[in-house]
Image (tube, helix red, strand yellow):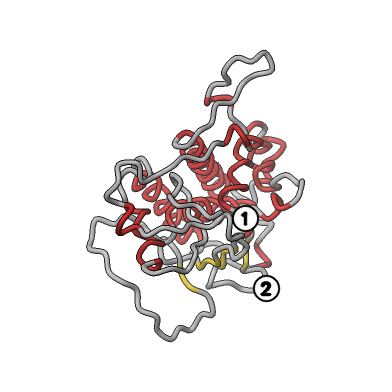
């Protein structure tokens, strides 16, 4: 059975019904849907701006994926901090009460990548594709969470931890490719929560489809292009009329991550 209310911080596929076009995005800007979403978006936009500046010195191209430097390392660390912050926000604003082996509560500071992986089940992170439109070579498509479609760990996140804890010996792991996987990973996480909404204080306008030089469409922040998941089962999708639902006090629901 499809879901008759949206979950906090969770964009999903939608059953095609009357008013579904409006309903697919309007719940995202409801003030109860997420706590301070602009806080997370602004952090990403700064990272995106710094990445574009880095592209002035390192050409976005296949040949440069193994490049490494202190600037790349710095951006890699910052981005992974934001990745962790977004995972924690999703878990905290839904239901998540992890425990230790002795049954006592496990505090937020001890949450880890195994906890974060639960979000893939509800947000289909492993099905997102991100494209860097200005790229030299064939590797412009990034799927930062694809390894989670199986049993593998995220290579780029392991590289982050290695370089963070032992920069002297693991510095080369903070390379251009791993950094780009982290930035596109952050972009996917935000897109899985907010679609293409950037919570700009300016006016909201409807997008108009026009001819484009690129075969893909831009997402949040208007730089990276994105392909949203198409593998939602009908029982996972949303099915509601937000014009009616938004007037109700209990218009949102929470994901129970303790059961995942």
Quadrant of the rendered image containing residue 200:
bottom left
Q: Name the residue under label 2.
A: 138
Quadrant of the rendered image containing residue 67:
bottom right
| Depth order, front residue of 206/200 | 206
Q: Which residue is drawn at 68% across and 43% down?
A: 159
Residue 211, given in percent of the width and then of the height, sits at: 43, 86
Q: Residue at x 30, y 59 (%)?
A: 243
Q: Which residue is drawn at 59% across and 66% down?
A: 230
Residue 101, placed above or below residue 77: above
Q: Residue at x 27, y 69 (%)?
A: 205
Q: Quadrant of the N terminus?
A: bottom right
| Depth order, front residue of 6/100 | 6
Residue 39, given in percent of the width and then of the height, sits at: 35, 44
Of all residues, the one furthest to the front in this rendering is: 1
Number of the front mark, 2 or 1: 2
Of all residues, the one furthest to the bottom in this rendering is: 211
Residue 128, given in percent of the width and then of the height, sits at: 59, 60
Residue 155, given in percent of the width and then of the height, sits at: 71, 47
Tell me: 126 left or right of 213: right
| Depth order, front residue of 45/220 | 220
Query: Does label 2 or label 1 sit earlier along the sequence?
Result: 2
User: Could you tell me how far apart the alpha carbons at marks 2 and 1 are, in whole angstroms?
Assistant: 16 Å
Residues packed near mark 2 inside 10 Å, few (<14), some (14 to 19) or many (20 plus): few
Residues packed near mark 1 inside 10 Å, few (<14), some (14 to 19) or many (20 plus): many
Q: Name the residue under label 1.
A: 176
Q: Is mark 2 on a helix, strand or loop?
A: loop
Q: In which quarter of the image is the C terminus?
A: top right
Residue 240, placed above or below residue 259: below
């Amino acid at each position: 059975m499809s879901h008759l209310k949206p979950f906090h911080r969770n964009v999903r596929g939608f059953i095609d019904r009357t008013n579904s076009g409006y309903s697919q995005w309007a719940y995202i800007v409801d003030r109860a849907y997420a706590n301070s979403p602009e806080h997370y978006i602004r952090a990403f936009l700064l990272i995106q701006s710094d990445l574009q500046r880095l592209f002035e010195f390192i050409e976005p191209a296949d040949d440069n994926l193994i490049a490494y430097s202190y600037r790349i390392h710095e951006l890699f660390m910052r981005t992974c901090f934001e990745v962790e912050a977004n995972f924690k926000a999703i878990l905290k604003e839904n239901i998540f009460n992890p425990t230790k082996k002795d049954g006592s509560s496990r505090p937020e500071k001890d949450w880890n990548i195994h906890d974060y992986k639960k979000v893939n089940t509800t947000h289909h992170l492993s099905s997102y594709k991100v494209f860097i439109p200005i790229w030299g070579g064939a590797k412009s498509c990034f799927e930062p969470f694809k390894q989670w479609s199986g049993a593998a760990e995220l290579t780029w996140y392991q590289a982050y931890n290695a370089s963070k804890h032992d920069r002297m010996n693991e510095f080369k792991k903070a390379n251009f490719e791993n950094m780009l996987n982290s930035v596109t990973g952050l972009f996917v996480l935000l897109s899985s929560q907010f679609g293409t909404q950037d919570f700009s204080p300016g006016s909201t306008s409807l997008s108009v489809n026009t001819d484009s030089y690129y075969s893909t469409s831009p997402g949040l922040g208007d730089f990276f292009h994105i392909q949203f998941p198409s593998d939602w089962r009908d029982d996972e999708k949303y099915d509601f009329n937000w014009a009616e639902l938004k007037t109700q006090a209990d218009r949102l629901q929470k994901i129970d991550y303790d059961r995942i």
